[in-house]
Amino acid sequence: MTDTTALPGGNTALFDADTDACTRAVARRVAGLLHPGDLVILSGPLGAGKTTFVKGIAEGLNVRGPITSPTFVISRIHPSLDAGPALVHVDAYRLGGAAELDDIDLDATLGDSVTVVEWGDGVAEELTDDRLEVTIERRPDDTRGIHMTGVGARWAHVVLDAQ
């Protein structure tokens, strides 16, 4: 089951997800809002469900898989299986900061793809003024709280909900 709480401003929401399938379902809905050039920054502790969330985005975008954490390769490009944008999946866990993220040359794909950066908080914000920030918390009862905030003009009037 997934519950949504709209927060003030329309472009911020909190989702409750009690299973991996619910987490992927929320992410599939988010994928329906994403366009080429969009950046999604994922944060949360180890095991919170960041890669599970990316799997849902990938399903929603209909890109080639499989989707696995790119911890050691840093970045993977998943081409679209239809006319949609590719998914660029980045894991910034091993990066030392924004300068190292810049070294993987995301500017080359950012405009044409949907870019999702796991562990991107404090590292990927400089890529663009417009981004969707997603923080996932794993609760003691093994449910997840998924907090989303749209930042910048691109997200100013986007209503985030699971309906």
Image (cartoon, rainbow, N blue to C red):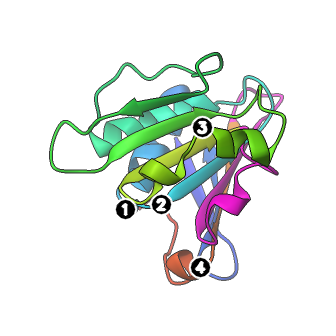
Question: Which callout, 3 or 4, points at the residue further toward the start of the chain?
Answer: 4
- Residue 143 placed where, x, y %? 69, 33
Q: Residue at x 77, y 45 (%)?
A: 99
> Which disc number belongs to residue 143?
none
In the displayed structure, 111 sits above or below 68; it is below
Residue 70: quarter of image: top right
Q: Are marks 3 and 1 in contact (CB under 8 Å)?
A: no
Q: Is residue 126 one of those drawn in magenta?
A: yes
Q: Is residue 93 left or right of residue 113?
A: right
Q: Is residue 62 left or right of residue 13?
A: left
Q: Nearer the viewer, mark 3 or mark 1?
A: 3
Q: Is residue 62 left or right of residue 105?
A: left
Amino acid on which disc 3 is placed: Ile
Q: What residue does disc 3 label?
A: 104
Label 3, label 4: how many angstroms apart (C-alpha)? 33 Å
- Residue 91 placed where, x, y %? 64, 31
Label 1, label 4: how many angstroms apart (C-alpha)? 19 Å
Q: Nearer the viewer, mark 1 or mark 4?
A: 1
Q: What residue does disc 2 label?
A: 38
Amino acid on which disc 4 is placed: Gly
Dot 1: element: loop
> Which disc number belongs to residue 35?
1
> Which disc number belongs to residue 10?
4
Task: Give the quadrant of the C terminus.
Answer: bottom left
- Residue 31 placed where, x, y %? 39, 52
Label 2, label 3: how many angstroms apart (C-alpha)? 17 Å
Q: Residue at x 50, y 75 (%)?
A: 159
Dot 3: element: loop
Question: Which callout, 3 or 1, points at the residue further toward the start of the chain?
Answer: 1
Dot 4: element: loop
**Residue numbers of the magenta segment:** 119-143
